[in-house]
Amino acid sequence: MNPPAINYPCHWAFTLIGTDERAVRAAVARYLEEKDYRLRPSNKSRSGKYISLHLDTEVENEEERNRLFAAFKAMPAIKMVL
């Protein structure tokens, strides 16, 4: 089975999971300071310990998409990237 073809540039969505919404927002803002993006609340865990934010931005190519994923994954404020 072939992976779906992605035509770049395109809008891409990431789900960012962390424990402190302000810290996640600040980390994203610092990293994407000159890039247009939309970051909005998505879900909270049942216990309230974890929050998720939905990030929409445009990526120019697969390399940029993978770079963003790796950068978000390496941020201490972000516990998981989907």
Image (cartoon, grey):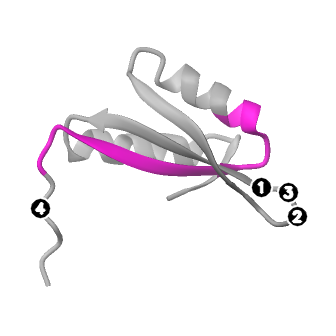
Identify the residue at image location x=77%, y=55%.
50
Q: Disc 3 versus disc 2: distance between alpha carbons?
A: 4 Å
Q: Say which mark, if any, is on residue 47.
A: 2
Q: Say which mark, if any, is on residue 5.
A: 4
Horizontal relation, residue 54 to residue 36: left or right: right
The part of the image, by quadrant, that contains residue 48 is bottom right
Among the two numbered marks 3 and 4 on one chain, the one whose residue lies closer to the N terminus: 4
Q: Give the amino acid at mark 2.
A: Ser
Identify the residue at image location x=17%, y=72%.
3
- Proximity of marks 3 and 2: CB atoms separated by less than 8 Å: yes
Residue with the mark numbered 1: 50
Q: Give the amino acid at mark 4.
A: Ala
Question: Residue 51's spot in the image, x, y percent?
Answer: 72, 51
The part of the image, by quadrant, that contains residue 57 is top left
Among the two numbered marks 4 and 2 on one chain, the one whose residue lies closer to the N terminus: 4
Residue with the mark numbered 3: 48
Q: Nearer the viewer, residue 15 or 72?
A: 15
Q: Give the amino acid at mark 1.
A: Tyr
Bin the neighbour count of mark 2 within 10 Å (Cα to Cα): few under 14, some 14-19, many 20 and up.
few
Residue closest to the far bottom: 1
